[in-house]
Image: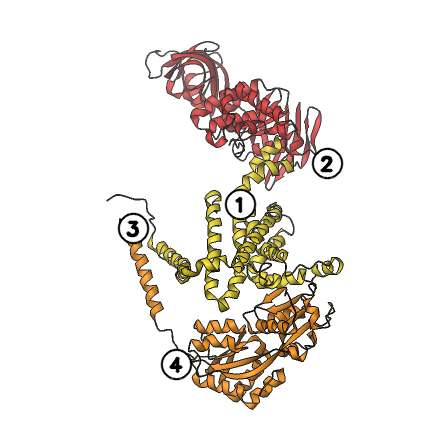
């Protein structure tokens, strides 16, 4: 018998792990089994589906870019050792994780809606209304995705080797220079990993989107919303769109994984 | 190799267990659904526009049938119908249109033919302050006016489409909500300038909204149907509740809410 | 050039140190773990603030607690070398070496040119485009040294630069460090727990214990006149330079010694005082397993805590450690002729 390097796990670990795999795999298998393969071509060329897919991909990507631009400095601040208020800030960052997405959507409305805290003045003075626009979709997605990036990057910053920075400083590099040339490259893998998580969260966002951005094909109807609506009347379309979402997400996640070790 | 053989065995065992459990009977066994007081519960799924009326009716029914309790679940008619077809444990279904009840009838899940419950007329709700200054139906066609409607596949959505068709207007809504209560909510918070809902919703919202007069020729109505379900675990209670709603007492409650009754 | 006097409190630990060093001097700071050596270095680098005192370099104040002055690390003329090379992993060797120059405003071309020149000078010119991860720890540390020297610091701070190397590389690296320090005209402060580093590389040695300096002086002084068992144990070594050919070494200053393993070229021999046995001069020189026996005269006798250090002039001149009882038995006093023997296996040899 040839020896192969297989997984040698003790039973108490193997059984739950297999149950977990079955639990994760079964819905996916069910989805594939229920797919109307004959109608696939029709459904995929349906403009509604294409619009929803395009909107989902573009908003998720823009939202991810925003989370990087805003999230990395925030993670930096959180990792700066101990300063008063840091705990409060961290709780704030974790909030979107704990908040049910719909509640997040309501909160966004109350903040940026036409009668909202900031949205009200914005509308009254500039005539700018945010809800029901793709901007609102991006905002909803950014709101729920930000914690993923911030916490990932903060973790990396906290566990980084500080002596690189001591050496760089001793050689004459200013704080900004050290951050830019030494620290940031060192945590780049964590930023990428956080971005992938953020993107995945953003593209799957539903509750905050439907509450804050509403539901309109081509403008604010992302794939999850389209699936939800289709479920009521055209189950086949819903399944096809679900598969599209799964395939699109999986291909991005798998392609990133090989480079950034998510 | 022992380890790999064991893995295969474990996967097979789990698969068999999963199949076995899914093959067990999923139909109701006729046992009384337990509730807190030890009495019996009848589960009623109703269109969200019936919220006010059915809540009142449920209370009256419980008072008239001591020991019983009515569990109400409101939502979009099409969603509820889908849930029933998917096997949701329910005893009575009330939809806001014959169209949304039809799939349930086709699936032979109703106990007999559904009966006409009441009729609801379309209404256009405006925020209490009507800051957009909407005065007539034609204003809704103005692209600057934000109009919310239900999704086309919901009864309130098709009612809106019929309304605009009858009035000869091209209205592009800014959002298509899943159910009529969501439309109403957007109007009340002032996020939209107008929302197509039912007369009963306008009545229920009281001072929170203002009703836009609709020309009588354009008034669209929708018929509500009610049916006890054939898979019900409480057939006795289900038909008692249905009869109660259709009785003079029940019909009066509906009329008080703004419905048109026999 | 360096004038520092400071106290620093860190929890229960207090560092209280006075140190001075002149241009081109190599000052070694030796002490056990927790004695405050790294704290001192970090304070000089400006990474940790002082509680009291000052640090002046070349007349310019870097720290002055009374005047509320604290110069940021980046603005000081320092460079840091630690035990791990810590080359920036995402940069090539050349960019690593040139990092300090570009950080201080040099153009890319200047930085590159200087870096290459330095790499060539230690024979690593072809490693310029390599990434640190592809090099051995020894090679990385050599580059780390260049990275520090490239900025021509006024104060070169080395924190146990050889301790992360394996023993085989350590000796060669020590020799190279010695060469680089010889041509360095700033102040070099070398922190180490290994006495050989201190004794071979330094002009002056400071011994630290529990945040304070317990003795300082030239390496020679410390070996011959340790002021405590602590210092004695810490720096308790004999060091002889010589030239080896085969098993024999011709010792600088006279005499010769036999080695366990043959080698050739300039060497550094080290052995602890207790590796020497001293007997009175009457024994037969041929009867013993020790291959190194020579006559010597007792010079100084330094007793403390039950043991005695004898300075013996052969040549070779060594410091031996014997019990007080032995001194009494043998009737040793200044000028007594004795027979010294040293096992060849006790001698540690490193290339000079």
Name the outermost residue toward the top. C254
Quarter residue B190 falls in: bottom right
Under tag 4, what secondary structure?
Answer: loop
- Marks 4 and 3, Cα distance to the nearest angstrom? 47 Å
Quarter residue C47 falls in: top right
Under tag 3, what secondary structure?
Answer: helix
Q: Nearer the viewer, residue C317 or C337?
A: C317
* Residue annotated with mark 3: B3
- Chain bearing tag 3 is B
Q: Which mark is residue B122?
A: none
- Chain bearing tag 1 is A
- Marks 4 and 1, Cα distance to the nearest angstrom? 56 Å
- Chain bearing tag 2 is C
Q: Mark 4, residues whose alpha carbon is within 10 Å: few (<14), some, or many (≥20)?
A: few
Disc 4, disc 1: CB below 8 Å? no
Name the outermost residue toward the front. B168
- Looking at the picture, how far across and down is residue B256, in whole percent? 63, 85
* Residue annotated with mark 4: B30
Disc 3 versus disc 2: nearer the observer: 3
Q: Residue C47 vs residue C290: left or right?
A: right
- Looking at the picture, how far across and down is residue B123, in whole percent? 65, 76
- Marks 1 and 2, Cα distance to the nearest angstrom? 43 Å
């Amino acid at each position: 018998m040839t020896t192969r390097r297989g997984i040698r796990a003790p039973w108490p670990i193997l059984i739950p792990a297999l149950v977990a795999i079955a639990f994760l795999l079964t819905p996916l298998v069910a989805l594939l089994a229920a797919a109307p393969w004959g109608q696939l071509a029709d459904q995929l060329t349906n403009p509604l589906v294409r619009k929803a897919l395009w909107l989902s991909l573009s908003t998720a990507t823009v939202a991810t870019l925003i989370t990087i631009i805003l999230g990395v400095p925030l993670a930096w601040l959180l990792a700066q050792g101990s300063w008063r208020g840091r705990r409060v800030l961290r709780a704030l960052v974790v909030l979107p994780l704990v908040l049910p997405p719909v509640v997040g959507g309501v909160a966004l409305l109350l903040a940026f809606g036409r009668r909202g805290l900031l949205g009200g003045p914005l509308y009254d003075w500039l005539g700018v209304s945010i809800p029901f626009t793709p901007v609102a979709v991006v905002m909803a997605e950014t709101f729920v995705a930000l914690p993923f990036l911030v916490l990932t990057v903060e973790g990396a910053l906290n566990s980084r080797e500080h002596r690189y920075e001591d050496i760089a400083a001793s050689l004459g590099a200013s704080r900004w220079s050290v951050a830019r040339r030494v620290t940031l490259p060192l945590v780049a893998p964590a930023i990428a990993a956080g971005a992938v998580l953020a993107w995945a969260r953003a593209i799957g966002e539903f509750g905050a989107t439907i509450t804050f951005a509403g539901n309109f094909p081509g403008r604010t109807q992302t794939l999850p919303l389209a699936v939800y609506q289709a479920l009521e009347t055209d189950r086949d379309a819903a399944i096809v769109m679900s598969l599209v979402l799964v395939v699109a997400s999986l291909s991005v996640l798998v392609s990133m994984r090989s480079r950034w070790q998510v | 190799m022992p380890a790999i053989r064991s893995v295969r065995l474990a996967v097979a065992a789990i698969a068999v267990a999963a199949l076995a459990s899914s093959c067990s009977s999923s139909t109701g066994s006729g046992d009384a659904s337990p509730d807190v007081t030890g009495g019996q519960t009848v589960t009623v799924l109703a269109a969200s526009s019936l919220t006010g009326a059915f809540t009142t009716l449920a209370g009256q029914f419980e008072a008239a049938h001591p020991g019983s309790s009515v569990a109400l679940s409101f939502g979009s008619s099409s969603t509820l119908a889908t849930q029933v077809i998917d096997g949701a444990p329910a005893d009575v279904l009330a939809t806001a249109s014959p169209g949304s009840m039809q799939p349930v009838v086709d699936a032979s899940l109703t106990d007999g033919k559904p009966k006409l419950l009441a009729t609801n007329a379309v209404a256009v709700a405006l925020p209490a302050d009507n800051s957009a200054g909407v005065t007539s139906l034609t204003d809704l066609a103005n692209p600057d006016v934000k109009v919310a409607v239900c999704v086309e596949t919901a009864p309130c959505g098709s009612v809106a489409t019929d309304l605009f068709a009858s009035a000869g207007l091209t209205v592009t809504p800014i959002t298509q909500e899943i159910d009529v209560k969501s439309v109403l909510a957007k109007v009340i918070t002032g996020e939209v300038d107008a929302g197509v809902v039912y007369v009963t919703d306008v009545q229920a919202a009281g001072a929170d909204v203002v009703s836009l007069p609709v020309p009588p020729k354009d008034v669209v109505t929708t018929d509500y149907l009610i049916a006890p379900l054939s898979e019900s675990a409480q057939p006795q209670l289900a038909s008692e509740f249905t009869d109660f709603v259709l009785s003079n007492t029940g019909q009066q409650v509906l009329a008080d809410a703004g419905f048109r009754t026999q | 050039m360096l004038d520092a006097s400071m106290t620093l409190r860190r929890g229960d630990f207090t560092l209280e140190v006075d140190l001075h060093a002149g241009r081109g001097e190599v000052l070694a700071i030796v002490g056990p773990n927790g004695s405050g050596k790294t704290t001192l270095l970090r304070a000089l680098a400006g990474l940790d603030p002082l509680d009291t005192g000052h640090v002046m370099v070349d007349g310019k104040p870097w720290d002055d607690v009374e005047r509320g002055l604290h110069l940021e690390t980046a603005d000081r003329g320092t460079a840091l070398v630690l035990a791990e090379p810590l080359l920036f992993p995402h940069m090539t060797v050349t960019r690593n070496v040139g990092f300090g120059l570009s950080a201080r405003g040099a153009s890319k071309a200047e930085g590159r040119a200087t870096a290459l020149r330095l790499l060539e000078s230690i024979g690593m010119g072809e490693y310029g485009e390599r990434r640190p991860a592809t090099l051995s720890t020894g090679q990385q540390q050599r580059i780390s040294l260049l990275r520090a020297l490239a900025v021509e610091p006024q104060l070169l701070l080395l924190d146990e630069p050889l301790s992360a190397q394996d023993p085989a590389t350590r000796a060669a690296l020590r020799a190279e460090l010695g060469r680089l320090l010889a041509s360095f005209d700033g102040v070099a402060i070398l922190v180490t727990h290994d006495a050989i580093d201190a004794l071979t590389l330094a002009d002056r040695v400071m011994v630290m214990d529990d945040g304070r300096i317990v003795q300082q002086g030239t390496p020679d002084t410390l070996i011959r006149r340790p002021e405590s068992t602590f210092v004695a144990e810490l720096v308790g070594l004999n060091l002889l330079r010589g030239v080896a050919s085969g098993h024999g070494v011709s010792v600088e200053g006279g005499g010769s010694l036999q080695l366990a393993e043959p080698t050739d070229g300039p060497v550094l021999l080290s052995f602890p005082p207790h590796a020497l046995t001293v007997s009175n001069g009457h024994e037969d020189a041929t009867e013993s397993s020790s291959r190194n026996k020579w006559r010597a005269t007792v010079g100084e006798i330094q007793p403390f805590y039950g043991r005695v250090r004898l300075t013996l002039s052969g040549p070779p001149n060594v410091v031996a450690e014997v019990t007080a009882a032995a001194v009494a038995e043998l009737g040793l006093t200044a000028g007594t002729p004795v027979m010294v023997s040293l096992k060849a296996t006790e001698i540690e040899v490193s290339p000079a």
